[in-house]
Image: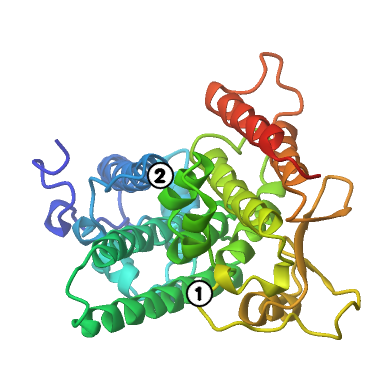
């Protein structure tokens, strides 16, 4: 219905600006028209984000493409929440920058150039724009994953150019996601949800979650060795780190499923490494690179790599060189290696429960089901 009404088109929206000399009735009329347009823009962006989240949860293609998002950028949160026409005008002139017209820029423009927000000051809603951009890149990650599945079954092995182009696309997407992540970290107003979503996309870019779920459904360890490199483990750990900082009761729906996927990724790694008798730094079969030593003399204690930590140097040492013992922290701050599969699942379950500390009616249905699945996987883990 939104598509048929041209709600995604730039031409659907008029440029409306209050004037200091506007009489009260004219100002009121402008404000109401502006608010109606702004509500439509925000509805479309909210629907775009929701559609993307549902697609990720169900591992399906999203209904709305980022290319359709030709609507103007959303105005600042303060303007949107203005209680009356006079407050709206006052806020407009307090944030307006000379020579800058944000209404001439569309969400599609922003998806292609995230740096433009720096030129717009407080005239637009930074948090909403960043979150929408995260899900815009998620659409490309989904297409990349589908292309990977197609190439995996491509019989003409002589067409190596297809694989080279595919690897180039992966590097480009990784750069785009990392760049947007940097923009989010530089923006004081950026939300935890945006950083969380970016870590999920970075994890998905390097591991096929459908294959991970298939392994958890007993397809065999050999499949997991083929699909699970070390890079997504770092992003899985960072998902846990960000999730701990989430506002209470926020870790539900899409975000709860993402925690489940992150936990499952680490669990599969631990199960394969344990059953193969491998130490974390020596699992060359889990990486597409050549066999690399774990660092340090044989028998010497190796460094603990907290995947949910902020030590970039040690994280790079693990993801690129296989050095150290990967793990995450439990709720008491104790380091738990990924080889302790049962404890990893218990940490994930506790993370979901702790986000609803005073829930009288228990966990939301989806969160409760995910916690139950994590508990079942914990019982399947034979090693503690």
The quadrant of the image that shows the C terminus is top right
Identify the mark at residue 82; answer none if there is no mark.
none
- Give percent across and percent down for residue 143: 28, 61
How far separated are the C-alphas under marks 2 and 1? Answer: 20 Å
Residue 166 in the image: x percent, y percent?
A: 30, 76
- Which quadrant is home to the N terminus? top left
> Residue shown at 51%/41% (left/top)?
218
Give the residue furthest to the top: 361
**Residue 320 at what x, y percent from top left?**
62, 81
Judge whether 223 appears above or below 351 on screen: below
Q: Nearer the viewer, residue 370 or 363?
A: 370
- Judging by the rendered image, the residue that carries numbered circle 2 is 53
Q: Is residue 338 left or right of residue 374?
A: right
SS type, badge 1: helix
Q: Earlier in the sequence, mark 2 or mark 1?
A: 2
Element type where label 2 sits in the image:
helix
In front: 324, or 189?
324
Closest to the observer: 19 or 253?
253
Whole-percent x, y for residue 251 in the image: 61, 38
- The residue at the point 74 percent across, 40 percent down is 382
Q: Which residue is mark 1?
A: 178
């Amino acid at each position: 219905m939104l598509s048929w009404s041209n709600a995604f088109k730039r031409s659907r929206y008029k440029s409306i600006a209050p004037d200091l000399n506007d009489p009260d009735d004219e100002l009121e009329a402008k404000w109401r028209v502006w608010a109606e347009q702004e509500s439509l823009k925000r509805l479309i962006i909210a629907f775009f984000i929701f559609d993307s989240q549902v697609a990720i949860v169900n591992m399906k293609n999203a209904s709305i493409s980022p290319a359709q998002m030709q609507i103007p950028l959303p105005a600042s949160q303060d303007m949107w929440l203005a209680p009356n026409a006079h407050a709206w005008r006052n806020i407009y002139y307090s944030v307006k920058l000379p020579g800058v017209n944000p209404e001439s820029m569309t969400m599609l423009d922003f998806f292609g150039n995230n740096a433009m927000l720096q030129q717009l000051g407080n005239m637009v809603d930074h948090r909403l724009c960043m979150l929408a951009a995260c899900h815009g890149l998620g659409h490309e990650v989904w297409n990349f994953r589908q292309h990977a599945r197609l190439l995996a079954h491509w019989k003409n092995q002589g067409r190596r150019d297809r694989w080279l182009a595919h690897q180039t696309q992966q590097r480009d997407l990784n750069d785009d996601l990392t760049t947007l992540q940097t923009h989010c970290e530089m923006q004081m107003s950026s939300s935890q949800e945006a950083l969380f979503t970016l870590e999920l996309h970075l994890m998905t870019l390097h591991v096929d979650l459908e294959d991970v779920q298939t392994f958890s459904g007993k397809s065999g360890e050999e499949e997991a060795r083929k699909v699970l490199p070390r890079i997504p483990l770092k992003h899985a750990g960072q998902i846990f780190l960000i999730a701990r900082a989430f506002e209470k009761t926020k870790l539900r729906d899409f975000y709860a499923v993402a925690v489940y996927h992150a936990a499952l990724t680490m669990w599969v790694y631990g199960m394969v490494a344990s059953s193969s008798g491998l130490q974390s730094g020596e699992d060359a079969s889990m990486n597409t690179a050549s066999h690399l030593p774990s660092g340090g003399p044989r028998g010497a204690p190796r460094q603990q790599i907290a995947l949910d930590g902020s030590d970039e140097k040690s994280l790079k040492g693990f993801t690129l060189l296989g050095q150290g013992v990967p793990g995450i922290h439990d709720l008491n701050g104790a380091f738990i290696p990924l080889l302790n599969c049962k404890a990893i699942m218990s940490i994930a379950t506790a993370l979901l429960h702790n986000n609803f500390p005073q829930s009288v009616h228990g966990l939301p249905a989806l969160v409760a089901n995910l916690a139950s699945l994590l508990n079942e996987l914990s019982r399947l883990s034979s090693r503690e």
